[in-house]
Image (cartoon, rainbow, N blue to C red):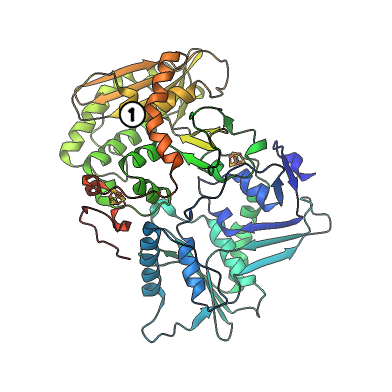
Amino acid sequence: MYVMEFRHSGVTRTSRVVRMSLGMFSGSKYRCPVQDSLKALGYTPVSPPPGRREVLGQVALRPLMDELDGRRGPGAPRRHRLDPVLENWTRHALRAYDSAFFRSDGDSGLSEVARPWTYRYPAGADDHRGATEYGITVWGRCLASADGTVRELRLPVHRSGAHNVPADGYVAVAALVTAEDRQSGPPDHVRVVRFPAAGTRPELLFAGTPEEAKDLHRTHGRHAVRALLDSAEYRPGSACGSCPFTAGCPALMRAPGLTGLSGKGRPRRTWSPTDGREYAACARRSRARSLRLPTLDAVERSPAAERGRAVHAYLAARHRADPPVPCSSDIPEDWVPAGFALEERELLIATAQLRRHAAVCPLHRVLSAEDVRVEPTVTMEDPAARVVVVTDPDLVYRDGGSWVWREVKSTSRRFTGTSNLMETYPQLALAVLMAGEAVWPGRSGNVRVEAEILRPHGASLVTLDPSSPAVRDRARKALAPLMAAWHADDSFEPQPGPECAACPVSQWCPDAAVRTGAERHEP
Ligand code: SF4
Ligand code: SF4
């Protein structure tokens, strides 16, 4: 059986038809290759993970697709009920779609086809994956000219940008499916465009003949299909929250009781310290962030936030060096990593913080690059709570026989003591609870958590012992208020107030009390 390639148990193959979707080729770091592979190959879980459906929609672009489906006429699928933030976003996205694609004379020359483009082909007689047929579907707007000679695929995305460049295999597969669908005769010309719902211009990904689409597939697509179907790479992370295959997954760590919550009657969810921070500020804000709606640069890239990210990016790059080189206080003038822009005051503060880091750099204590993990994603499921917890420590390193979880916080504030660190920085409380549960490679020894606080005039290093019941108890108490209300919430109501002025998603919120120079997108 092909499943023997996986170490995964608790799955059974219920179909010999291989069903791939274009999204599986996106190359997103948030997708898990094994989950995609199992789904595509027709496996289903023997025991699906428990958890009821969410009350609110979880896919930000789904209502846009529903609205566009609805324009096709009365037989169109039923639309979802929207909460205000999703309604606001969807109306904005619809206006952006119309202004991008509809011509003033009302005739774009293209109209939507009856069914989304699909590419199917029969498997060979001795298919090594045991398949009888292969198929690839797309999730986008599929249009054709009246005579069928021109086809266009419009793929919705939240927004485009350098951080979101589509993989070559993704473009190749999209072009092939558009060219090879057989619900009508073959086209002469094929276009694939990406439509950023945030409102920027559509991007042309491919334009050419069906032959050129097949050439591109031979160059990039075939390899992408093989990589998808034959992958054995587990990538625990946010994908685990909606994964049907958790029960037999050897890569997902379990920590019963980690959150201290009961999941009875609750949906499965993913939680990170960022969720906790956002929810504490405003429930609706955390909802908009979890939908990954575009944020305001004026808030997200404020001078202080930009300084903090630049410091972290610089240290992460330094700590990835192989062999490891401890950081020195000799900071180069042009240290600011590409993609960051610091104002003069922030540059002075950040440079002083980096100089202070040298004295407490953990690389003084490691022997080889094998002993260092920079920003590793640590994922644990609390089955009793139906919550998957995901966090990215700044650094994990081995000091002799002990693994150390290091969180680095940079601040321009004056030193106020270290007595309430876990309350101030929930990542530390989470680190205390997760470090004791994690499976650490190599020889196991004591695990400790370190909090490195960088200020312009000094650096503090505080050690927390996860094996201490008192420390763990305090960590639980620090996290409980951040998790409990979020876990029980189904409506994510707004909490307008002064915080709205620093809300990165206020442009999607009809209840904002104050705005940050952002255009308000009215429903
Ligand atoms: S549980 Fe997580 S790591 Fe395991 S297959 Fe699912 S998504 Fe991948
Ligand atoms: S604008 Fe205010 S009420 Fe709306 S999501 Fe942001 S913080 Fe909450």
Asked whether 266 or 355 is in front, the reply is 266
Of helix, strand and loop, which one carries label 1? loop
Residue marked by disc 1: 425
Q: Which of 214 and 134 is in front in this view?
A: 134
**Residue 304 sits in quarter:** top left
- Horizontal and vertical percent for residue 475? 40, 23
In the rendered image, residue 18, in percent from the top left (x then y), is placed at: 71, 56
Image quarter in which the C terminus is found:
bottom left
Q: Is mark 1 within 8 Å of ligand 2?
A: no
Residue positioned most to the left:
345
Q: In this view, does 255 lie to the left or right of 136?
A: left
Residue placed most toward the observer, 416 or 58: 58
Place of residue 427 in the rendered image (x, y in percent of width and height, measured from the top left): 39, 29
Disc 1 residue crowd, few under 14, some 14–19, many 20+, Cα 10 Å: some
Three-letter code, disc 1: Tyr
Estimate the x, y position of residue 312 in percent, counting from the top left. 33, 34
**Is residue 473 something that shows in the picture?**
yes
Position of residue 376 relative to residue 367, above or below, is: below
Seen at 45% across and 25% down, the residue is: 396
Question: At x 59% / y 57%, what residue is drawn?
Answer: 220
The picture quadrant where one finds residue 449 is: top left
Q: Residue at x 75, y 48 (%)?
A: 13
